Image: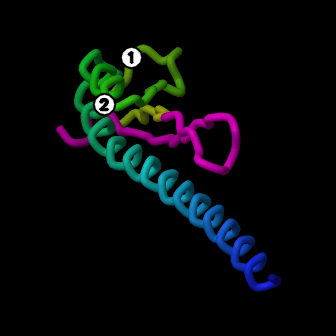
Amino acid sequence: MGSKLGLILSISIIFFAFLFGADLIMIQLQYTDLDSMSATISYKISKEAEISESLLAMCEERNVTIVALNPEVTGYQKGDIFSYTLTREYTPLVLGNQPFDITITRHAVISILN
């Protein structure tokens, strides 16, 4: 009797540990996807010195929100640093009841590649 109860309890614990591990892997995948996207976005911002409509469309189709950290600056010169954040919402399996945002902050140097 005791071994059957132990087996049932251990299976439930293993199941929740598996879901917890799946949540951690999915969060890392989301973060990695945002990080790889930021390389392309930084290159385009470096060339255009702004968040263009094509960048907004690219971010929208991949369910990412892009926000400039210093929107009050209007004219960027060569060598200025443009800071922005990329945010994506993640709904966890077992880490919580509410979806949360995964956010990364990146910087692009204007016209350094020209």
Q: In the image, what residue occupies the spot 29% across and 20% down?
A: 57
Residue in the foreground of this view, choosing between 110 and 71: 71
Residue extending furthest left? 114
Say the numbered circle drawn on residue 66.
none
Q: Residue at x 53, y 39 (%)?
A: 90
Q: Residue furthest front?
A: 1
In front of the other: 78 or 73: 73
Q: Is residue 110 above or below residue 106?
A: above
**Residue type of the residue flagged with mark 1:** Gly
Marks counted in the figure total 2
Residue at x-position 70% and y-position 68%:
13
Amino acid of disc 2: Ile
Image x and y of residue 31, in percent = 46, 49
Range covered by the magenta-colored residues: 88-114
Left or right, 85 with reference to 109:
right
Q: Which mark is residue 45?
A: 2
Instruction: Give the mark nearest the N terminus, 2 or 1.
Output: 2
Which residue matches tag 1?
75
As for residue 113 lying within the magenta part, the answer is yes
Tell me, yes or no, whether the highlighted magenta stretch contains residue 106: yes
Residue that protrudes farthest toward the right in the picture: 2
> How far across and down, in percent of the image, does residue 95 sit?
67, 50
User: Is residue 35 found left or right of 28 in the rendered image?
Assistant: left
Q: Where, quadrant-wise, is the C terminus in this rendering?
A: top left
Q: Nearer the viewer, residue 37 or 2?
A: 2
